[in-house]
Image (tube, rainbow, N blue to C red):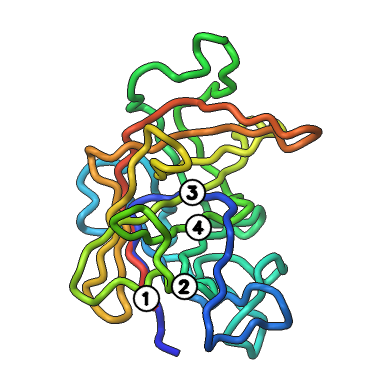
Amino acid sequence: MLKRTIMIAALLVAGGVVEAQKGKPSGGGGNTLFPVTAEFRCPMTADCQLPDGIQGDSIGPYRGTTPSGSATTQEGTAANYGSYFTEGNLFLFVLKSGFGRFASFDFTQPIGTAPCASSRTCRRDFTFATSDESLPGGRTYPVDAMGSDLPNGFLSIPVGTTGRARILLNFSDPSGRALLWTVRFDPELHPGSTFLTVTRPAANVWTIEAGLSDIGGLTSATTSGKSVKINEGYFRMPFKIAITE
């Protein structure tokens, strides 16, 4: 298996449906994960000229961890932490509290008024958020011209071409409330947001990027009792992530 490295300019985190791919082991029924390297544009790379809306930390690239002696891990286990491709070749980003890695989110560029403002149900009381937890892990799904998921995820994108993708990234509440926050670039499941751009410059390299014209949506959901989700508004959140296999 080739070594995978992904460059992404932002962090997005959320749960999603996992697609199975023929030819890769199921690992006993769970979703087998294959480590890749993911590097956010900011704050570490030379092309970080303006603060991105989604950023990594200053430690360096992220890479998925696996149990000792194994090349893979299973989703939902203690060894599942960092950046991976799933069996269906989706990009999975997982942060867990206590591991010393973080992602940051900047909400200083809102687009209009949040839908929850008129009913006074908005929960967001922060402008910036830094989180060491993104559970469930955030997923990125490459899509075709109709917005449908590509059958083989990132591997469906021909080398030297550019396409689109939807992403969702989760982070925990900065004040410790029982809330899960999710940034979504997904106009079909979150109308008002946009798709991201995904490019494959080499066989084992991809980039994911939200430009200045792209719009991310923010939702909050209660994590105790009955889940209640609220649309917390729309934001410009440019970022870029490079992924290497």
What amino acid does circle 1 point to? Leu
Q: Quick check: 9 left or right of 227?
A: left
Question: Residue 155 — which label?
Answer: 1
The residue depicted at 55 percent of the width and 46 percent of the height is 170
Q: Residues within 10 Å of mark 2 (few under 14, many from 20)?
A: many
CA–CA distance in space, label 1 to label 4: 15 Å
Closer to the camera in the image, 216 or 147 = 147
Residue count near mark 4 (Cα–Cα under 10 Å), binned few <14, some 14–19, many ≥20: many
Crowd class of label 3 (few under 14; some 14 to 19; many from 20; radius 10 Å):
many
Q: Position of residue 90 (x, y in %)?
A: 47, 67
Amino acid type for the residue under numbered disc 3: Leu
Residue 41 seen: no
Looking at the rendered structure, the secondary structure element under dot 3 is strand
- Identified at 33% across, 36% down, the residue is 215
For marks 4 and 3 on the same chain, the one whose residue lies earlier in the sequence? 4
Residue identifier under label 4: 139
Q: Tell me the CA gap for discs 2 and 4.
A: 10 Å
Work out whether residue 141 or residue 70 is closer to the camera in this orientation and state it.
141
Drawn side of residue 104 relative to residue 109, left or right? right
Residue occupied by mark 2: 89
Q: Amino acid at mark 2?
A: Asn
Residue contact between numbered discs 2 and 4, judged by CB atoms under 8 Å: no
Q: Are marks 1 and 2 in contact (CB under 8 Å)?
A: yes
Label 3 and label 2: CA atoms lie apart by: 16 Å
User: Residue 168 bears which disc, if any?
Assistant: 3
| Mark 1 surroundings within 10 Å by alpha-carbon count, few (fewer than 14), some (14 through 19), many (20 or more) | some
Secondary-structure class at tag 4:
strand
Label 1 to label 2: alpha-carbon separation = 7 Å
Residue 38 sits in quarter: bottom left
